Image (cartoon, rainbow, N blue to C red):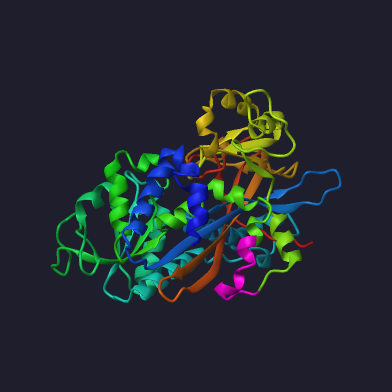
Amino acid sequence: MDEEFLDRVMGEVEGVGKVDEFTGQLWRRWRNLRNGNVPRPMQLGLFRSDYLVHAPGGGEPASLKQVEFNTISSSFGALSECSASLHRYLYKSTQYYAVSPHLKEVNFPVNNTTAGLAEGLAEAHKAYGVPNARILFVVQEGERNVFDQRWLEYELLEKHGIHVVRQTLHQLGESATIDPLTRILQIMPPSGLLSDGSTSVEISTVYFRAGYTPTDYPTPAYYDTRYLLESSRAIQCPSIQLQLAGGKKVQQVLTSPGVLEHFLSDAARWGADAFTSAELQELRSSWMEMWGLDEDVPGAAGAAGECSGVCKARERSAKLVLKPQREGGGNNVYKEAIPTFLDSLPVKEREAWIAMELIAAPQGLGNYLVRAGSGTEGAVKTEVISELGIFGWALFGGPDKQVKEKEVGWLVRTKGKDSNEGGVAAGFSVLDSVFLVDD
């Protein structure tokens, strides 16, 4: 909610937006909304914070380290719940043939992510205050992740009586209109007619499962459609502002001395207790070291014509990942590929990238990975890494600045240790579930 901070970090005057066109396009629409004095409704965030176990060895204890914090299209909550249910069912039906004393029903925790995420959307719908309005799911063309989304749609209808409309940004460019007086967002269905005979529906909440990657905006008109949706009184999930706040550059800047402290020292105005110095240190200890490629950083003098941020990235490339301002997997640069990438990266684009120390995964954890359709013959035994995602939602803002928030479930993704990327939809990892082991 700190506009000055986001302008400085992500804007096109001082921040990432001046060198990254995707970020700049979003920031400019947000600026135009502010300059137009468009009243801001409440905002909804469906979040996922991702973690890996860091086990560097050398006597240092293992700990959880944050990979990233997702503020847009935080997916696979519903399908992760299905994976957990599958593993519980297999235990009940086979007891996994008693291959381990740890295999007890109590060690298979229930995952209720679907109900939790749907609750967040339902709370936004309720705050909007029009019971017969609908929730809009903004989806990608040829959506491949439709089944994860459908479970949320079914939950909203069956448990909350809320109907969902699914449309792409392309469709919305033709179907979405805003009443100039009331700012009500109306959507025409593709068929042109609803079951009750009406030709349009009012939208209470706009839930983005698209819009996080430049390919979702093939022309400027698509960004204008995003602006149109945002200028309505419908609650956005997320708003452009909240999407920008989830940028990798924001994550990196928060690790800088004093920045986290600035925000958490002001916790009282959000109704939270003040953070102690020990709690602040505990939060900081969950982050790996990060820095901007365009910055002067301690630990590297910098070669001729090269800032020290780039020089440090060259020196430590074997244990680093470089991240741009992108979501969805397949965008990062890892280890041995970093020096060649830095050679080709224009100086003006360095500000759009951050360097992050790689999390050292535990050694010797083996499992079988099975790809759909390959059968047991296609199973591959390999060392694996599992990533834990924690879901939650927050409804906040509006004239009274109230905050509602809740932690609602989890996700586990497992991949081969030799794989740098971790996206399920991108084909790098498989859905898994939590299994508790007695200490």
Question: Can residue 168 be seen by looking at this rendering?
Answer: no
Against 402, residue 325 (above or below) is above
Residue that protrudes farthest toward the left in the picture: 197
Residue 15: x %, y % from top left: 50, 44
Q: Residue at x 55, y 46 (%)?
A: 249
Q: Residue at x 49, y 47 (%)?
A: 10
Q: Please say whether residue 220 is one of the residues in the magenta stretch.
A: no
Residue 343: x %, y % from top left: 58, 23
Q: Nearer the viewer, residue 119 or 414?
A: 119
Q: Quadrant of residue 318?
A: top right
Residue 270: x %, y % from top left: 55, 73
Question: Can residue 405 be seen by looking at this rendering?
Answer: yes
Q: Nearer the viewer, residue 416 or 203?
A: 203
Q: Please say whether residue 270 is one of the residues in the magenta stretch.
A: yes
Residue 78: x %, y % from top left: 47, 59
Q: Quadrant of the C terminus?
A: bottom right
Residue 419 appears left or right of 158: right
Q: Residue at x 35, y 51 (%)?
A: 29
Q: Nearer the viewer, residue 346 or 65?
A: 346
Residue span colored magenta: 262-273
Against 37, residue 272 (above or below) is below
**Count of numbered circles in the view:** 0
Q: Nearer the viewer, residue 56 or 212?
A: 212
